[in-house]
């Protein structure tokens, strides 16, 4: 566990490119050397996994694997404090490490809500103690997520947790004046308001994407316009007050078009998409199995196409998991009674491979951009989302894209089991994750 | 017939016609002094009602009892707001008691699917109305009533008028009547038609007067007054305006062909979607629908339960 141990990663494809040896020492990358000239000779040798050289350096044979910078999630629900039956900082960060993440942003909708310096510092400290993945708490925009009065955003920014991302996620800051004030206020400390775009009056008791299927299934519809109207308004507000807006979990083709337009105007708007919105359609609601109930809801195949294109062309900056653990009883019930949300940390990179890489829409360098560099920039993280280069903090994930694994809900590190991919084969496996030079995952298991 | 009846879409034309012809045989019982057959003796039918519906419950209860089944009425009231015992625990209890069929009425769309597909119970599940989704036995009794009055439904035009958006009766009828060859037109203000209704394979109209002259049957749906308020969704401005534009009164009844029948699944709101003189007129088959409901539910229970017993039906 000591950071003094050094690791030599041999032959990993750097951002999916040339085979490279990567030496990790004292928490940083000590050497990054292309090995393309020697690869063919090594190709015939059998893999021995991790071995140790005479000087104590552990060797990780990573031939055929892809080396990416440690992933950064902008959108995780760790549930602690308050719902430790669903997830804890310990289990959630273990799931994150297994998914290749070295940093995550913990959403504010805990109990108590993360709307004071005290709560964000508690979550931040729990993350440090767990040590599997750096935890950056998100602060609530409004007191108690009630949408009435700004929380003490400055106090959270100045706290030990150094909060830069503020969100009422789970609820929309629907009041236009309050949203304007929040956007203005966070400029004082380089913050960003991450909006859960959902016009509440258009989505009262909404259960699934509004379309032909919601009508047939008799489930109250969640229309795309309820998301798009808020995004359009917020883009205009962000432009007007010259602040920074981040749009959470974009789910519709119309949202992509609006964000593309806002960016073309030069406005400071960023956006994320969830892995499940890149792969799963609303047709799954026909099972009435609440494991597919999520907010925003699964949309149509044409929305998926637009989201993939938007992610590929950079309209959507980042992939964020919206990892939302729920205890079994909250999903083992009528659709209408069930909680919204699905697990995402452990499967995110595999889903992105299936939806984006295997389809030819994004190369691995693009994946590094969308899952590490950009989210770190949006969250104003200085030690994450850095290049794999000499002297940089050794945050690294080694991913074997050649595997295919059937997802086992009972095998999650997360305390909860609500993965929508259970029983489905997904490509690729996270083989190792390094956080500042220390392995959090080795041989595909927690180190 | 399949093991469950969850949706009108579970029935193909042959199966639907088998239910209707079986119901016709069983209906004759109603005219006999002793209205009982031993067909389901020793079998247990549970009426599991998470939502009040006295008329549907007693209809199923009468149907099961006339087939000599043992009937257990289980009222498990509770809503999404006031969580009572979970559906799962209720289901496990029923399974432990050895129910052969569970007739479920639930406020949540899809609850019967959950019950049938969760592995909690082995019994047959009959959907007696789930949320705003479906009510297949209502559609069967409506089809049976039409069939008795009109003969074959091929090419027959059925107008369904009212709150289609919230109506499980409309959904099941739109499916089943089409299966049986009828042409269905849904008539409602645009706010009370679901998004995507164009994909249902039925006609839609906002103008009842344009549709009535060609209809062979008019089915009026209940429209709750509270739908006009902000809390109810604000779907129409006032009860008076709704009645004027979509209510069936004696003037509109005059537009109908001589053979056209008027139906209502009940409970009616007289003066809202239908006037008293229409409801009580010769064209009205509303009371007959109730009688037919028992016969159709007997047929459904008989076909579901007599087919899956090792000893076979008596």
Image (cartoon, coloured by chain):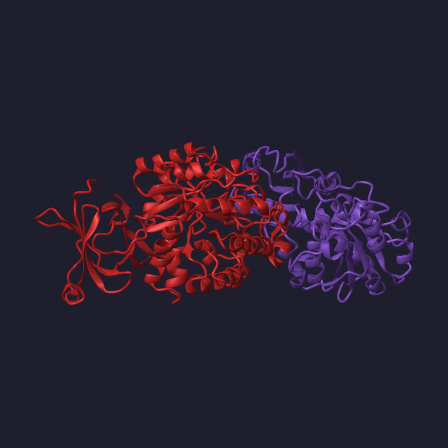
Chain colours: A red, B purple
Foreground residue, A430 or B253? Answer: A430
Quadrant where the N terminus of chain A lies? Answer: top left
Asked whether residue A327 appears in the rendered view, the answer is: no
- Residue in view at x 76 percent, y 67 percent: B155
Asked whether residue B168 appears in the rendered view, the answer is: yes
Quadrant where the C terminus of chain A lies? Answer: top left
Q: Is residue A413 above or below residue B22?
A: above
Q: Is residue A410 above or below residue B2?
A: above
Q: Position of residue A49 (x, y in %)?
A: 19, 52
Foreground residue, A150 or A201? Answer: A150
Foreground residue, B114 or A258? Answer: A258
- Residue in view at x 52 percent, y 46 percent: A290
Q: Position of residue A282 (x, y in %)?
A: 54, 56
Q: Position of residue B254 (x, y in %)?
A: 91, 59
Foreground residue, A288 or A433? Answer: A433
Q: How many marks?
A: 0
Q: Is residue A47 left or right of residue B30?
A: left
Q: Position of residue A343 (x, y in %)?
A: 43, 46
Residue A171: image quadrant is: top right
Q: Is residue B288 left or right of residue A152?
A: right
Q: Is residue B140 left or right of residue B1?
A: right
């Amino acid at each position: 566990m000591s950071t003094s141990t050094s690791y030599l990663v041999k032959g990993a494809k750097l951002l999916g490119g040339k085979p490279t040896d990567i030496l990790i020492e004292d928490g940083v990358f000590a050497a990054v050397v292309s090995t393309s000239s020697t690869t063919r000779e090594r190709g015939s040798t059998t893999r021995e996994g991790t071995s140790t050289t005479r000087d104590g350096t552990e060797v990780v044979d990573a031939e055929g694997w892809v080396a990416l910078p440690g992933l950064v999630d902008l959108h995780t629900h760790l549930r602690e404090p308050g719902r430790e039956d669903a997830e804890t900082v310990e289990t959630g960060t273990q799931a994150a490490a297994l998914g290749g993440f070295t940093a995550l942003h913990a959403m504010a909708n805990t109990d108590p809500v993360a709307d004071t310096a005290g709560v964000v510092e508690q979550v931040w400290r729990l993350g440090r103690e767990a040590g599997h993945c750096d935890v950056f708490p998100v602060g609530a925009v409004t007191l108690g997520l009630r949408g009435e009065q700004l929380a003490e955003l400055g106090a959270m920014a100045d706290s030990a947790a150094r909060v830069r991302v503020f969100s009422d996620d789970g609820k929309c800051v629907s009041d236009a004046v309050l949203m304007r004030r929040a956007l203005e206020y966070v400029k004082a400390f380089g913050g960003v308001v991450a909006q859960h775009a959902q016009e509440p009056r258009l989505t009262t008791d909404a259960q699934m994407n509004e379309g032909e299927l919601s009508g047939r299934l008799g489930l109250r519809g969640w229309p795309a316009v309820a998301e798009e109207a808020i995004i359009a308004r917020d883009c205009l507000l962000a432009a007007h007050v010259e602040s920074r807006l981040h749009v959470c979990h974009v789910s519709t083709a119309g949202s992509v078009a609006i964000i593309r337009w806002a960016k073309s105007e030069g406005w400071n708007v960023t956006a994320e998409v969830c892995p499940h919105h890149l792969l799963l359609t609303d047709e799954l609601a026909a099972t009435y199995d609440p494991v597919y109930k999520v907010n925003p809801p699964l949309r149509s195949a044409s929305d998926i196409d637009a989201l993939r294109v938007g992610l590929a062309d950079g309209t959507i900056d980042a992939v964020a998991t919206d990892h939302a653990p729920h205890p079994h009883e909250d999903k083992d019930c009528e659709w209408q009674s069930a909680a919204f949300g699905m697990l995402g940390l452990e499967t995110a990179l595999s889903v992105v491979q299936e939806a984006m890489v295997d389809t030819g829409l994004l190369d691995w360098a693009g994946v590094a951009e969308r899952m590490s560099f950009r989210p770190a920039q949006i969250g104003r993280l200085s030690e994450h989302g850095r290049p794999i280069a000499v002297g940089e903090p050794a945050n690294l994930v080694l991913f074997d894209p050649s595997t295919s694994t059937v997802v086992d809900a009972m095998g999650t590190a997360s305390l909860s089991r609500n993965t929508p991919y259970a029983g489905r084969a997904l490509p690729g496996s996270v083989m190792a994750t390094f956080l500042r030079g220390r392995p959090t995952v080795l041989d595909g298991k927690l180190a | 017939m399949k093991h469950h009846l969850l949706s009108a879409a579970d029935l193909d034309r042959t199966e639907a016609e088998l239910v209707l012809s079986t119901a016709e045989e069983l209906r004759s019982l109603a005219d006999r002094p002793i209205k009982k057959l031993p067909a389901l003796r020793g079998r247990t039918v549970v009426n599991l009602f998470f939502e009040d519906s006295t008329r549907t419950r007693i209809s199923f209860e009468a149907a099961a009892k006339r087939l000599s089944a043992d009937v257990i009425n289980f009222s498990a009231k509770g809503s999404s707001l006031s969580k009572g015992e979970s559906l799962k625990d209720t289901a496990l209890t029923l399974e432990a008691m050895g129910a052969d069929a569970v007739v479920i009425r639930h406020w949540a769309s899809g609850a019967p699917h959950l019950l049938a597909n969760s592995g909690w119970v082995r019994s047959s599940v009959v959907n007696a109305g789930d949320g705003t989704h479906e009510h297949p036995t209502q559609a069967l009794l409506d089809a049976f009533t039409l069939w008795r009055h009109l003969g074959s439904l091929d090419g027959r035009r059925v107008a369904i008028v009212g709150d289609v958006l919230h109506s499980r009766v409309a959904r099941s009828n739109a499916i089943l009547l089409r299966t049986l060859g009828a042409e269905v037109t849904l008539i409602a203000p645009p706010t009370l038609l679901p998004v995507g209704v164009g994909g249902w394979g039925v006609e839609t109209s906002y103008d009842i007067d344009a549709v009535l002259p060609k209809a062979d049957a008019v089915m009026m749906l209940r429209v709750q007054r509270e739908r006009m308020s902000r809390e109810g969704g604000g779907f129409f401005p006032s009860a008076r305006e709704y009645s004027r534009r979509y209510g069936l009164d004696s003037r509109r009844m005059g537009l109908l062909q001589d053979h056209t029948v008027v139906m209502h699944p009940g409970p009616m709101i007289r003066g809202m979607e239908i006037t008293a003189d229409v409801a009580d007129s010769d064209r009205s088959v509303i009371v007959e629908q109730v009688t037919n409901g028992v016969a159709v539910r007997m047929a459904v229970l008989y076909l579901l339960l007599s087919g899956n017993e090792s000893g076979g039906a008596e």
